[in-house]
Every structure is written in structure tokens, then in C-alpha cells.
Amino acid sequence: MTSTERQFTSIEICAGAGGQAVGLHNAKFKHLALLEIDEHAVATLERNVTGNPQWSGCKVLHKDLTKIDLHELRLQLGLERGNLSLLAGGVPCPPFSVAGKQLGEDDDRDLFPKMLEMVDEFDPKAVMIENVRGLMDAKFEKYRNWILGELDSMGYKKCFWGLLEAKDYGVPQLRPRSILVAMKPEGAKHFRWVEPELKKPKTVADALWRTMRKRFQESGHPGWESAYKEWFKDAKKGVAPTLVGGSKKHGGADLGPTRAKKAWANLGVCGLGVANDPEEMTDPGRDLFAKNGPKLTVAQAAIIQGFPQNWHFEGKKTAAYRQVGNAFPPPVAEAVGRMISAALKAEKEEREAARSEDIQPVTELPVQSALFGAEAADFSDDLQSAVAG
């Protein structure tokens, strides 16, 4: 299916490396714009989207939301208020993350107010906002209610706000995320939440066995096969802990805090760093045969996030890994996107059906429906006289 066959449009803020964008694209939304501030993530989006016919019409915009004129942006995109189907975004999580100070609305990185300003300016039919689990903590109840109150004042109804686990959607990772979906009433009444049907979570071994076997085999190490089998045995134990992208202020890339590193070790993976790409690997011992097991490449971390393997990440290893670690898993975004799309489709069909009922063909209405008795007879006589000349 090409982008021209997609019924519903979307704009995404804080698009990052495109995790949510990929998911919504797979849910058949036609992206009009992806807004992102990080230069490496912008380069990633441009690499994958610009010139790609499947993403035709999508603009990658390198923008700082705190400095943007939203009215000017809407005009730049050629949108009338109310014409956009979906406004989506994963607003920055540090204000609500348990790994930080959880300053919430007092954190200058909180972009919920800006997101709500954008909702007011674009007046989309649906809104989808993703954030970390910490946002659902009791301490932020007042703030959540404020967000819902603002949406209600703009004519939106809450359809869903809860925690989703990535592992329930075929992603081999523990990655709980807060998801808010709100829609205009005419669409909200059609929204139906569908629970995931996955019965058995995908393990790290399920996700990585091909790429890991290839890395071991191509290393040329005499003990590669036994080392691979040892890794596979451990990797079958379960799903991965939550990948952490980290901050630009702190060191290089690794797979998370101490507890996460221990969980990775239990799965046969060294979480102390990220491996070089195979073609750049100069020391197989460091990346594959160390005591703590093999390190993941950026591409393998992306698989753990649920990205398709043809999605490329720009920047050096640390910058690329941070994009992956901070991403929203595409399969989760796709599942939510399909529910929104289904509601939008039902609302559209209902509106079109009502319009067709209001417009009846004139040929179906007899003349007498508007003229009665003597008036009808007079009209008939006048018509015959006119025809006779």
C-alpha cells in the first residue's frame, strides 16, 4: 500500500529515531511531518524517510518545540484547523522518570503544555501521547487531571490512559510505557480498546539468534560455535530488561543501570557497553568472547526495541545507540494506532452515511409531495400550457 492510499494523516512531535513513526506508518497513517530537535535523530529520520515513496509527503523538521510558532507551522504544512487526523508524540520523559528527580511540571524539559498548545492550534481528530511509567505514579495524579481537563476544555474525551508492556506486543523487552489516547466525541464513541493476544513473550534468543550466530561465525574464532551455543542457552531464559538511552551528559553507551546489567548477564549478554558493528570490529574478544559474554551491536539493540532491520541509524555508535535506547517500540505504537484508525474509520463511515441519507435524489420525490389539492392541479395546468406554447 502506498502513502496515497492511506486514509488518515498524522504529525508527530519529539519523533526521535522514528519508533512511534514506524508503528503509526505500519498502522497505515500518512505522516505529514516528523518534528525532532536532536541532530542525529533528524539525520536518521531523513535517511529513512526522505525520498522514500512509502513516506511520500512526509517532512522531517529539525525544530525546537519551545521556540516554534505553532500557527506558522500549521500554515507551513497547509492544514486547516480540524483537518489533521492524529497528533502524536512521545514528550520528554526525564521530568517523570524514576531514574531522575521527578520534578514533573517544574522541570523545564516538560513539554506537555506545548503539546496541548499544539492540540489547540491544529484541532486534530485524535491525540496520542507516550511517556514513561513514572507519569502514572500517585504523585502526578493532579498533573494528569490537569492534562485531561485541558483536553476536555478543547472538546476531547479520554479513550485510554494506562500502562502498556512492550513484551505483550511481541517485543522481546520489558518496557512499560504510559499511553494516552483522546479523541473528539464523534470518534471517541467508536474507540474500542483491544487487549493484546500474545500468549508467549518473544525471548532474546528468538529475536537475536540469526544476527548473533552470524557475528560469531564471521569472527573466525575457533571456538565460535560453542560460544554461540552457550549464549543461546542463556538468551532463551526470557525477555530483555528495559533498554536505556541515557543522557548526553553521562559517558558512553551501556545497557542500563546495575540491576539491568545483571539481568542482561543472566541472558548471556554483557551490558557494560555496546559492540562495534561487525565490519568495524577489530577485537572480537572484546565484543564477543569476553568473560561477561557478547555485547550487543546498535542494530541488535534496535531489534530488541522492535525496529525493522532495514531501519538505519545515523551517527557514531554512542549517538546511534542513544536513539535506539530512547525509542518507543514500533509494534506497540502500531497496535494503538490501529485502534485509533478503526475509530476514525467508523466515525467517517457514520458521517458519510448520515450525509447520504440527507441528500435524496429529486427523482424519488413526486411533485405532489410539495403541492397539494388545488395547488397541484393549478401547477399541472400551468405546466401543460407552457408546453403547448
Image (spheres, rainbow, N blue to C red):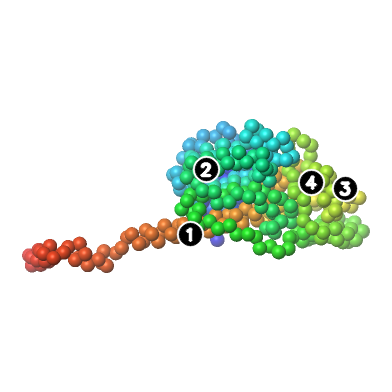
Q: Please state, as top left, top right, bottom left or bottom right, where the C terminus lies in the image.
A: bottom left
- The quarter holding residue 244 reads top right
Q: Residue at x 56, y 32 (%)?
A: 67
Q: Could you tell which of marks 4 and 2 lies nearer the N-terminus?
A: 2
Residue 233 position, x and y percent, is 86, 61
Please, what is the three-letter code of the amino acid marked with disc 1? Ala
Q: Tell me, for residue 346, which label it has, or none.
A: 1
Which residue is labeled 2 in the image? 151
Residue 108 position, x and y percent, is 64, 32
Which residue is labeled 3 in the image? 286
Q: Residue at x 88, y 59 (%)?
A: 230
From mark 4 to mark 1, how far is it between C-alphas?
Answer: 42 Å
Residue 21 position, x and y percent, is 61, 50
Please, what is the three-letter code of the amino acid marked with disc 3? Arg
Q: Mark 4 and 2 residues: CB-CB less than 8 Å, in contact?
A: no
Q: Please state, as top left, top right, bottom left or bottom right, where the N terminus lies in the image.
A: bottom right
Which residue is labeled 4 in the image? 255
Q: Can the viewer see residue 312 in this picture? A: no
From mark 3 to mark 2, how far is it between C-alphas?
Answer: 51 Å
Which mark is in front, 3 or 2? 2
From mark 4 to mark 3, how far is it between C-alphas?
Answer: 16 Å
Which mark is in front, 3 or 1? 1
- The quarter holding residue 228 reads bottom right
Judge by depth and name the residue closer to the eye, 103 or 237: 103
From mark 4 to mark 2, how far is it between C-alphas?
Answer: 36 Å
Judged from the image, the secondary structure of the residue bearing numbered disc 1 is helix
